[in-house]
Amino acid sequence: MVELRSFGEWLRRKRKAQDLTREGLAERVGYSAATIRKLEAEERRPSAQIAGRLADLFNIPQEERTAFLRFVRGDWQAAGDWQAAPSGQSEPAPWRDLPLSPRSNLTTPTTSLIGREKELAAVYQYLLRADIRLITLIGPPGIGKTRLSIEAARAALPHFPDGVCFVALAPLDDPSLIAPVIVQTLGFVEMGRQLPLERLKDGIGDKQMLLVLDNLEHLIGDAAPLFYELLMGCPRLQILTTSREALRIPGEWLYSVPTLAVPTESSSIDMEVASNFPALTLFAERARAVRSDFALNVDNVEAVANICTQLDGLPLSIELIAAHMRLMSPESLLARLNDQFILHADGMRAVSARHKTLHNAVAWSYDLLSEEEQKLFAYLSVFSGGFRLEAAESIFSRTVTDTSVADLITLLLDKSLLQRGLDREAQDELRFQMLVTIQQFALNHLRKRDGETEARNWHFDYFLALAESGEPHMSGHGQLEWLPRLQSDMDNFRAAFEWNLRVQKDTEKGLRFANALFQYWRTRSDYREGQRWFDIALNLPRARRYPAEYAKAMLNMGILKLIHLNADVAEPFLLQSVTLARTLKDTRILAEALDYLGLAHVFQEKFEQAHAFLEESQLLFRAANDRKGLALTNWHLGWLLGAEGNHMASLEPLKEALILSQEVGDIHRQSIILRAIGEYLLNMGEPEEGRAMLRQALSASHAVGSRLEMANAFCVLFKAEVYFSNFAKVAQLLLTARKLYLDCGAQAHISSLEQELNRLRNDPNFPDLEPILAQTQTWTLEQTVAYALEDME
């Protein structure tokens, strides 16, 4: 019995089984014998058209052809036993029994990968070796390291049962954020005072998984020791990185990503050999994307070959230049290219020359822009993580005179200097981005114009204003609209806040910025990031000179610590906020600070003091006719009564709080109040009504993406399921709640949940929790929520 591991081996054996030579098979499918040899050697993959001809030739059943095509194209790696089947028996079909794909966040490409079969196979083989723990793809910018890393990771996905995670490091300027960003992308949570690196080592443990860490050259000095420690602490972890230089740590395997093959000066190029040069194929495909009638032919093949050779076979250079085929022929393009580039006689073989070629490719496109296009192109480099059209128009309309920002962005899109796609969070919105190397080029030109400070100040003011515009909607009717909008621009918010911290140093605006995003962090359970911002803002120089913003920041910090940590940690911040608000005679801040101080005393079981604070808060909110505030204080008064054991009395203020929250449109608060009402109804012996309320609470918290409130809803829903003897569901809900608590770092909730889980483990009426835990790990959050809401009328 012989083990079959590849399409090439399958093809070789099928060919021999039918007594075909390579020449004979080539004639039947329309390839050369040399190409058949490459297919069998796994140096090349056939096109979909040729795969169809192979399926016809070898009589692949119609119902299996989709899986067969995936096998042929290398979209999964078939592994199994193969032997020549006797006549009359079923043929071997290694594309059957597709493996379940482990979890990954790898993006789906929008263009085909051309000319990288050999490189893909080599990196894939590295990934299959357990003794190779760290692989670094090195090469100049624009060589295609990122795309190759993603495709190799996708091919190797079945070999990493605990998943593959892609982390883009290019947006990071601060090396200290490397570990926290990986933690966040993996869905781990920093626990207590545990350092992010330790959290990573604990979370990964002995899992067999792959981290793909992209674009780390600007962080390499700090990344190297961090990754070494991570590999030492996680024995089955493998890391695939992309960089312009090696990490230079023990165990690192380097793979230099080559340029695409191009004809040499001595080569005679014709249509028969043109397909042997992937650079020409790439140029032709990208040209055809912008001009549907373009085709590589005997008349233009030499000009195209010269263009690709002068561009040194760099994929990004080729794609940028090919985009101009919409405007001119290959011959005129070549003439323009010669005018812009000064090539060395040695063919620019050194790495630095390749970098210069890439720079010149971008510079050539830049030089073709009008003055206003160039100016806007440079200004757009200050965005981080992309931008919406309205942001670019609002910030930079002041800089253009002859046309509109929208028209200029369209022109930059046409010239491939910008990319366009749907907003990841708000799918109905377009978002624009620059490739990293292009953005750096644009930023260099902005600095040459002495325009960076001005542009970043405008950028800061815009995103501060955006955050402040969203603040009132985050606790009102615009909540569902503003949550994804703010999420989409978190990289821009971070970049703006960092700019103010390092350069602008406007303390008042720094405090305002943190305060404006407080409701976002609270709703989305991003307590860690929120506390980091407030810790910075409250310690800015002269922060106390802005007492109103300072008092509000102390209040917001106290609220985050109350929810995320505990009342003892939060109380000093709340007390300072109360003191400042009384001095300022700011009744809005005072009322809210008193309210949360009362809640802190509820958690501390200091019920008499809690009553005093909450009642004073309620009086202030009533005097101001503040309906949002009254919803808040009624909710907490109800909670206080419930904590005192008076569940019946607690329902009245809670229901009043629910009505007020519905009137003002605060879905997040509704989810919390519904959960409290549901829990008290359960405690009063009303399981049906209580479960209905809890399901509403879960639906509301899921709508706004509050991980903490979803976990809280799961933790109470399990009590209703106990009543209905749904023991498997009980375990599922509690295990999912634990996962969510860990995700958002809600330490105050985890210990009590662990006690409940331990009780269940020792209860003979409950099923074994371990299989349910394994099932939970594979479910999406949406699946778990749907499961919890089953049978809801």
Image (spheres, grey):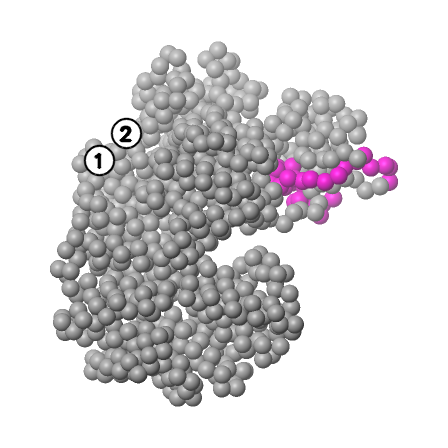
Which disc number belongs to residue 447? 1
Q: Secondary structure at mark 1?
A: helix
Residue holding disc 2: 367
Mark 1 or 2: in front is 1
Using the image as rendered, state which of residue 417 and residue 584 is in the foreground.
Answer: 584
Highlighted magenta segment, given as a residue range: 60-88
Other-residue count near label 2 (Cα within 10 Å), few / some / many at <14 / 14–19 / ≥20? some
Q: Residue shown at 61%/64% (left/top)?
A: 769
Q: Position of residue 351 (x, y in %)?
A: 39, 22
Q: Residue shown at 30%/55% (left/top)?
A: 532
Q: Does residue 479 appear in this view?
A: no
Q: Residue shown at 52%/23% (left/top)?
A: 277
Three-letter code for the amino acid on which mark 2 is drawn: Asp
Q: Give above or below for 245 relative to 466.
A: above
Q: Residue shown at 49%/28% (left/top)?
A: 254
* In the displayed structure image, the side of residue 424 where residue 520 appears, left or right: left
Q: Position of residue 8 (x, y in %)?
A: 67, 31
Mark closer to the chain start, 1 or 2: 2
Three-letter code for the amino acid on which mark 1 is drawn: Arg
The question of residue 66 being in magenta is answered with yes
The quadrant of the rendering that contains the C terminus is bottom right
